[in-house]
Image: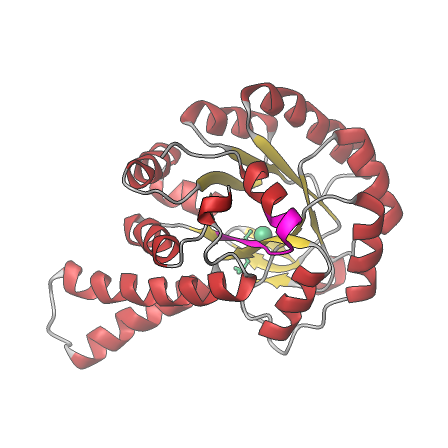
Amino acid sequence: MPLVNASRILQCADEGGWAVGAFNCNNMEIVQAIIRAAEEEHSPVIIQASQGAIKYAGLGFIAALVMQAVKETRVPVALHLDHGTSYEQVVCCIRAGFSSVMIDGSHLPLDENIALTRRVVETARPVDVSVEAELGRLGGVEDDISVEERDALFTDPDEAYRFVQETGVDALAVAIGTAHGLYKGTPKLDFPRLEQIRTRVKLPIVLHGSSGVPADAIREAVRLGVRKVNIDTDIRQGFVNAVRRVLDEKPDEIDPRKVLGPAREAAVEVIREKIRLFGSAGKASEI
Ligand code: G3H
Ligand code: ZN
């Protein structure tokens, strides 16, 4: 099955009141784990590449891995650029076959974020590639991007309205209290703000930094209009914990397949659980 535009999945999720998981991949095992979990749950899925993943594996390798994976699957899959840093990077990803991109101008003044995002939409839409943008700033660390708590900024609903009107984006990532990476305490989401944003913009909302967010909070966010839930840290944690377990049990193991195979299985379980939580299990045939 060819890659699908993420917007198609998001529209369907919006009609049905569920969310799709957007899972970060860093290597072959994680790409395979995402696909296997989606197949086992009959769920559509978004596979996304962060800046760190692109640096580690290379854009061409990630695209080729995902293209190979989708050849062999029947569930709808979108390949998405996560936290795209520039117009030029977006163009590289579109040329490499990505079906969806994020342009993250959240660190820019509003007018500049709007101008950059609109330019990306004008390029991506004619070639059937969906565009996500971000307004507000998440705290925490993701790969090389680190935002101090004091610099984090919640999304303003009025600005969100103007942003969506002037850019024409397909999905909007918002800052409502989540953060990238591991949480020190329990995150507290600003649901009234989410409700206000969603009332104003009527667009699929994206929740970043969703690893470690309690299940009830995720359910409430989905009820209020979150349609794409980004998960990276929980997969990394499940994967690396399994590697540790194997090496603790067999310190002399030297076969990478015997170390990474169980890690891949652990990642499948993490992703399956998320898919069920987001409500996308069984929805593959609706896309
Ligand atoms: O863009 C990716 C995510 O927002 C992942 O966040 O590592 O906290 O799951 P996470
Ligand atoms: Zn993110």
* Residue located 51% across and 56% down the image: 280
Residue situated furthest right in the rendering: 158
Task: Name the spot of residue 85 as percent of width and height, x first.
Answer: 59, 37
Residue situated furthest front in the rendering: 285
* Residue located 38% across and 69% down the image: 238
* Residue located 11% across and 65% down the image: 254
* Res 181 seen here: no
Using the rendered view, name the quadrant where residue 126 is placed. Answer: top right
Viewer-proximal residue among 43 and 58:
43
Task: Name the spot of residue 230 as percent of width and height, x first.
Answer: 55, 55
Q: Is residue 52 above or below residue 58?
A: below
* Residue located 27% across and 69% down the image: 243
Using the rendered view, name the quadrant where residue 261 is placed. Answer: bottom left
Q: Is residue 141 above or below residue 245?
A: above
The image quadrant in which ligand 1 is located: bottom right
- Residue 117 is left or right of residue 228, and the answer is right
Task: Name the spot of residue 146 as percent of width and height, x first.
Answer: 60, 55
Q: Tell me the quarter of the image containing the N terminus.
A: top left
Magenta span has 87? no
Task: Name the spot of residue 206 as percent of width and height, x first.
Answer: 64, 51
Render colour scheme: secondary structure
Number of numbered tags placed on the structure image: 0
Magenta span has 18? yes
* Res 229 seen here: yes
Find the magenta span and give its range.
13-22
